[in-house]
Amino acid sequence: MDIRPEPFEPPAPIPRTIPPSRLEIIKVMFRNPLELWGKPSYTLPWMQVKFFGQLTTICHDPRLIKHILVDNASNYAMQPIRQLVLRPILRDGLLTAEGDVWKRSRKAMAPVFTPRHARGFAGQMLRKSEEFSERYAELAKNCTEINIATGMTELTYEILAETLFSGNIATGTAGFADRVDSLLGNMGRIDPMDLLLAPAWIPRVTRLAGRKALKAFRQIVADTMDARRAQMASDKPVPDDFLTLLLKIEGPDGLTRDEIEDNILTFIGAGHETTARALAWTLYCVAESPHFRVLMEEEIDRVLADGADPVDWLDLMPHVRAAFEEALRLYPPAPSINRAPLKDDIWTAEDGTKLHLPAGESVLVMPWTLHRHELYWDRPRHFIPERFLPENRDRIGRFQYLPFGAGPRVCIGATFALQEAVIALAVLMKRYRFDVTENTRAWPVQRLTTQPLNGIALRVSAR
């Protein structure tokens, strides 16, 4: 007899049944855009609506998504509202650059993030995860309540600092999570001026509070670059890492100083953020799914007892990976992918229906709604990691699951993030259990990433 409990349904906004007013749209977009979407967004293959006078096409059909992000990707630029939000933070970093600047940056960084090279970081990821896990040792003895979102931000920052910057980022861990929250919480949200497509030079009052955090991050980047430049100019050995690579290609045939600074900021301030949030959501969902947690613990214990090299854990721990991938489905770090056609486009559906995508209008590929869509997922609002186990994974279409995007702008660090996540989860869950408490109030909000509002309270105890 199957005694498995009903799968856990993590918290998320209930789809709207009544369209919001124009004023309500502004309020919701500022407060939490995830609360805007109505029932049709979770049931129709695509839809077209007028949004502040602009035609907006919301795409869910996997064939349509492939057309936009892959087959005709050269016809789609970044959507203006997205750029109005992100460019003040990241400028010409990899997430926001376009045209030749993006091509040069992507080409320059690609060697660091090949699967083969990423696998070489496994030892460093393991060491930093083990060092971090020691911080919970005393807390676990007393079954202390912690904010797991803050912890995962600190852990992924330390892994990033060690692997890509050889531990030479010019700041410590203390207060880092708070600075990230201040930066992304204030700067990474839509301002009413953005909805009106006001020019970038018009101040966004809602982002004023984030300027101090942005200035602090820019200073961290400048100090980090100066220290490494001085090291490169001396006779001392220089780490052959991401930072050195970027500084070596500065010049007319590579990247400008400003572009290098923008990309370093992108990885320090935002590059680790996606994995941090996904790890916190994973541990929360697993805490609410004790049946699957036991399977993960048994798998972790077995692989670690065999002495397997951490470079192989991603393949040897399918249950751990499945839990992380399911958390990525329910809480995609990048909840929307925003594009605008450069020229008029027409896409033909399987039934012959023609969808017109006019130049300059808005096209949204929404991982948040796509990953919870009733046409493409069974019990889409529930945490069911089994769907990502090897025997089931092939049933998931390439373009119905987009935690790392797709096409030319697919996330350059996808392999890095998956490996990092499995290693971190294995180390933490080998030693500890994380459980919900009466203070656990997990609620997703969209900023730059899908963040838990006010963090996630979990109780840590020794296994």
Image (tube, rainbow, N blue to C red):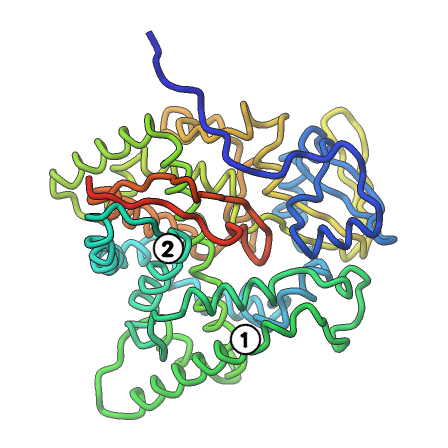
User: For the residue carrying disc 1, how many other residues have a C-alpha within 10 Å: few (<14), some (14-19), or many (20+)?
Assistant: many
Q: Which mark is residue 214?
A: 1
Q: Is residue 163 visible?
A: yes
Task: Give the tally of numbered discs.
Answer: 2
Front residue of 103/290: it is 290
Three-letter residue code for mark 2: Met
**Left or right: residue 407 compared with residue 311:** right
Residue at disc 2, secondary structure: helix
Give the percent coordinates (x, y) of residue 4. Answer: 36, 18
Query: Quick check: marks 1 and 2 in contact, CB under 8 Å?
Result: no
Q: Residue at x 75, y 63 (%)?
A: 194
Q: Quadrant of residue 15?
A: top right
Is residue 254 among what the camera can see?
no
Front one among 230 and 355: 230
**Three-letter amino acid code at the position of disc 1:** Leu
- In depth, the one of 427 and 341 nearer the eye is 427
Instruction: Identify the residue at image location x=55%, y=30%.
Output: 381
On-image quarter of the N terminus: top left
* Quarter placement of the C terminus: top left
Gap in angstroms between the C-alphas marked 1 and 2? 21 Å
Instruction: Decide which of tag 1 and tag 2 comes sooner along the chain.
Output: 2
Q: Position of residue 333 (x, y in %)?
A: 51, 50
- Tag shown at residue 152: 2
Horizontal and vertical percent position of residue 69 = 63, 48
